[in-house]
Amino acid sequence: MRGEMRKYYRFRFARYYGGIATADAVGCNLLCAYCWNYYRNLNPWKYGTFYSSKDVASNLRRIALKRNISLFRISGAEPILGLRSAEHLIKAIKLTGGEFILETNGLMIGEIPEIASILSEHPVSIRVSIKGWDEKSFEKITGARGEFFKNQLKALKILKDSGLRVWPAIMYDVFGESGLQEIVKKLNKIGFDDVELEYLERYPFVVKNLRNRGILL
């Protein structure tokens, strides 16, 4: 962040969700082995340009108008790194004037629950990407300390209790059937019966990163 501005390196149309205007950010609080934006998040100072919320919304609206769509998202990095980036995000959501799909790892929402209350005032659906089925797998996948694993589950419950449309997602190729069953048990305890399954983009650097962290496919 620089003031209220955040770094983005690309604005584009994406086919997901039936068509969505996407702002690709850099800078994340995790460094997941299978992240397609791994190197930009590893070296965020090398990539992108700082944009205000107004500029982000303007770029997204331009894409939406051209493609006749009304869905928006931020991708490539965690949208919520703290209160300043949350404020930047919420301003962008307001200015786009459409439905926003927030893709998040949930760590900061679990840490700062009031963010969920603010989000509940806006047209946003939230997809929480769960990075592991326990503390040990979370550490391997993200490179962060295992103690933060619980923040993701906490975020899901907070968001649901705030009345938001929210669902969990996992990288099935990494979890496997045993990891899926483990996380489903934990999700059931906080009121989630379904989980979205993602499938790995097997870029050579992704396969190498997974191998280096001892994650076997």
Image (cartoon, grey):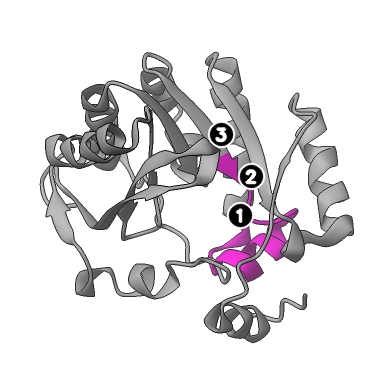
Q: Foreground mark, 3 or 1? A: 3
Tell me how far mark 3 sits from mark 1, CA to CA.
14 Å
Q: CA distance from mark 2 to mark 3?
A: 9 Å
Magenta residue check for 63: no
User: SS of the residue at dot 2?
Assistant: helix
- The residue at which mark 3 appears reads as 155
**Residue occupying image coordinates x 82% and y 41%:** 184
Left or right of residue 102, residue 82 in this image: left
Residues at discs 1 and 2 in contact (Cβ within 8 Å): yes
The location of residue 35, given as percent across then percent down, is: 51, 66
Residue ID at (53%, 64%): 144
Q: Quadrant of the C terminus?
A: bottom right
Q: Position of residue 2 (x, y in %)?
A: 12, 52
How far apart are the two marked residues, 1 and 2, measured between alpha carbons? 7 Å
Indicate left or right for 189 with 57 as reference.
right
- Residue 21 in the image: state x and y as whole percent: 35, 41
Q: Residues within 10 Å of mark 1 (few under 14, many from 20)?
A: few
Q: Quadrant of residue 213?
A: bottom right
Q: Is residue 130 above or below residue 97?
A: below
Is the residue marked by circle 2 packed among few (<14), some (14-19), or many (20+) residues within 10 Å? some
* Magenta residues, start to end: 128-146
Residues at circles 2 and 3 in contact by the CB criterion of under 8 Å? no
Residue under label 1, please give it: 147
Comes first in the chain, label 3 or label 1: 1
Type of amino acid at the residue the image marks with label 1:
Glu
Does residue 9 sit above or below 71 in this rendering? Answer: below
